Image (spheres, rainbow, N blue to C red):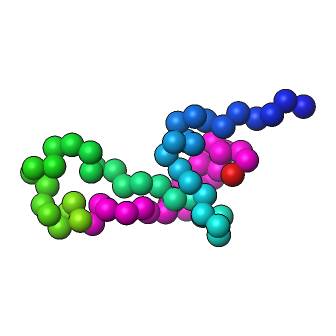
Amino acid sequence: MPKMKTKSGAKKRFRVRGSGSVKRSQAFKRHILTKKSTKNKRHLRGAAGVHSTNANAVAAMLPYA
């Protein structure tokens, strides 16, 4: 049986935590930052978890995670 391929876009964007939950980075922090408030940019720092409604789709893209 051949190995399943991981989606290469997903392996760059997601990491699986030790508990099994999936970690993702925040969006809207790359460019056009001058019009965003300091508070908004501060809250976009750090990682966030993948929402439960999207967890199954992400798990399908990362078969061995």
**At x 80% / y 34%, what residue is drawn?**
3
Q: Quadrant of residue 63?
A: top right
> Which range is magenta?
43-64
> Going by the image, does 51 lie left or right of 29?
right
Quadrant in which the N terminus appears: top right
Question: Residue 20: where, in percent of width, then height?
Answer: 65, 64
Q: Above or below — where is 9 with respect to 14?
A: above
Question: Residue 21: where, in percent of width, then height?
Answer: 60, 64
Judge whether residue 62 is colored magenta: yes
Question: Residue 8: where, in percent of width, then height?
Answer: 57, 34
As drawn, which residue projects farthest toward the left?
A: 35
Question: Residue 45: where, in percent of width, then height?
Answer: 31, 62
> Going by the image, does 42 lie left or right of 15?
left
As drawn, which residue projects farthest toward the top?
A: 2
> Going by the image, does 39 lie left or right of 45?
left
**At x 9% / y 51%, what residue is drawn?**
35
**At x 21% / y 60%, what residue is drawn?**
41
**Would residue 22 be seen by someone viewing this image from the given angle?**
yes
